[in-house]
Image (cartoon, helix red, strand yellow):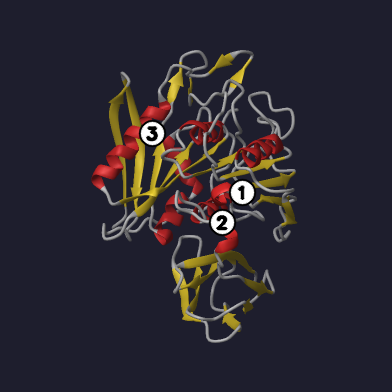
Amino acid sequence: MKQLFTLLSLVLALNTFSQQTTHSFTWDGLTREYIKYVPASYDGSSAVPVVFCLHGLGDNMNNFTGIGMNYVADTANFIVITPQAIVDPLIGSSAWNSGASYLGYTLNGSVDDIGFFGAILDTLIADYNIDQSKVFSCGFSMGGFMTNRLGCEMNDRIAAIASVAGTIGGALNCTPGRAVPACHFHGTGDSTVYYEGNLYGNDAEDLATFWATNNNCGGTPTVTALPDIMSDGLTVTHSLYSSCDDGAEVELFRVDSAEHVWLTPANDIFYTTEIWKFFMKHSFESVSVDEVETPSFSVYPNPTNAMLQLELTEINNASIKLYDLLGNELINQKANALTESLDLGDLPSGTYFIKVVDNLKGLSTTQKVVLQH
């Protein structure tokens, strides 16, 4: 499960007042490290979420900041924690005690990673105004396996999980004890952690079934094909398991032909923003999604060469915002009609994110827009 994902081909511009710092402390006899990112928007006046981002086998925390979660934090106001795994003495590579095993060997089986994460969280709570109902974890490959372990064993503190190319490790006996919102992304062309025939844990669809069963989700999933916008040779199918206990939905994104990579805005799906969209729906006090009317809208044409049309379901207290890949807000206007037009003609070609915000309810929906002059 060697880390194989391609870093985003963009430079994330960090606000001068944002703080990314590296920390270390001794835990269970080992020196442990992590990177903390605090966005410029944090002022301590309101409680903010926390997102743990866990790297893959053989990777490191500095490299994994390249998934762009910091940029999302800049616009959504949450703290990002990117921890460092310990080197396993047998293979000489960094590895989480995730429960992923092969031929009976579990990497770093004696390392207390769960305690390490708990200690980080305790420090954050002491130093910042943290919304303890909104602590989340995501991870890639072995980091995905570790994230699922947190869903199994640390769900008294982790509200929801999202994994990419990493499932529940074969050495684990996962008994969560509560309904855990879970989202998983996996490419069918993954030759490291197979979509089917996974050598280190359960298969991707079995993972979704496990969490759906654990969460007592009702019926069969709703299956939707995502728009095939980019010329990347990939197609995405989304399966949503709903009507679950405590609103703990389960989502599976199957990406046909995708390999062992973290997909970026150059693809039909950007894993980082999809993960945050999933997290935004869940907390320890979350209600069923059926009870939450998030603002919905459609955009066309997409891609566009200049003019963009928006069809809104309602305009009461709604605003329309446009962001570039660096999180810069380019447009912020009140919605005055159910049909709105945006002129993007003065912007350079590229990928943007359009957000419709219900200012009364504090809810929002985001879609990706491609501008091609």
Q: Earlier in the sequence, mark 3 or mark 1?
A: 3
Q: Is residue 149 left or right of residue 131?
A: right
Res. 373 in view = no
Q: Earlier in the sequence, mark 1 or mark 2?
A: 1
Residue, disc 1: 244
Residue 362 image position (x, y, % from top left): 44, 68
Q: Residue 188 appears in which quarter of the rendering?
A: top right
Q: Which amino acid does the dot numbered 1 rest on? A: Cys
Q: Residue at x 75, y 50 (%)?
A: 233
- In the displayed structure, would residue 262 be above or below residue 172? below
Element assignment for label 2:
loop
Q: Residue 307 appears in which quarter of the rendering?
A: bottom right
Residue, disc 3: 117
Res. 69 in view = yes
Residue 151 image position (x, y, % from top left): 51, 36
The answer to which of 109 and 234 lies nearer the viewer is: 109
Residue, disc 2: 288
